[in-house]
Image (cartoon, rainbow, N blue to C red):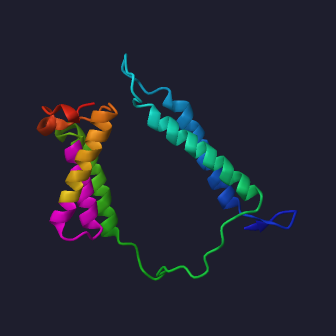
Amino acid sequence: MTASASGRSFAIGEFLFTLALTALGAMTLATAGSINVPLGNTDIGPRGFPYAVGAMLTVFGTLLCIQVLRGNVGEEEVDEDVDTSASTDWRTVGLLVGAIVLHVFLIVPAGWPIAAFVLFTTSAWVLGARPWWRAALIGMILALVLQIAFGGLLGLSLPPGPVLDQIGIFHG
C-alpha cells in the first residue's frame, strides 16, 4: 500500500485486481456471442449464463475500481490464523490434480455425470470428508442435479454417457 498525493492510501494490488475483474467481465461479454445456439431455440439457451456473469463481473469490477481509486481499501491482516512453519501437503495437491485429470479423461467415454461423480467424490474424500459413502452419495446427487439443470433444462451439450443415454431428461 502506498500513499497518494492527496494523503489517502492507494493499494496497487487491489487496483490491479479490480481491473482484471473488469477485463474478465468485458472479455466474457465479448465472447459469449460466439457460443453456438441451435436454430429455433426459444428458451434462455447457452448464452444467457455467460452474459449474466460477464455483466456482473464488469459492473462490480468497475464499482470496486472506483472504490479503490477513492481510497476505500481493505484493512491489512495483522493476526492471520496461519501456521507459517507448516509445509505444503503435496500428497493432497497431487491427489486433487489427479482427480481433475481423471475427470477430463472420463467425460467422453463415461459421460459427464459419471466423471463429475468421480471428481466430487474423490475431491471430498481427499479433503477429509468421512465417511466415504456419504461423500459418494452427495457426489452422485450433485452430478445428476447438474446434468439435469445444465444438460436437460438449459440445453447444454453435456454428454450423459452410456449409462444415462436412454433417459431424455439428461440430454442437452
Residue at the location (20% across, 39% down)? 111
Left or right: residue 65 versus residue 96 is right
Left or right: residue 43 versus residue 28 is left
Residue at the location (52% across, 31% down)? 31
Residue 171 spot, x, y in % from top left: 23, 32
Residue sitting at the far front: 43
Q: Is residue 96 visible?
A: yes
Q: Which secondary structure type mostly characterizes the magenta part of the structure?
A: helix
Residue at the location (64% across, 52% down)? 18
Left or right: residue 2 versus residue 75 is right
Q: Is residue 160 above or below residue 101?
A: above
Q: Nearer the viewer, residue 2 or 25?
A: 25
Q: Quadrant of residue 8?
A: bottom right
In magenta segment, residue 149:
no
Residue 67 spot, x, y in % from top left: 72, 56
In magenta segment, residue 120:
yes
Residue 141 spot, x, y in % from top left: 22, 52
Q: Quadrant of residue 161?
A: top left
Residue 65 spot, x, y in % from top left: 69, 52
Quadrant in the picture for the N terminus: bottom right
Q: Is residue 131 above or below residue 156?
A: below
- Residue segment shown in magenta: 113-136
Q: Nearer the viewer, residue 166 or 8?
A: 166
Number of dots carrying numbers: 0
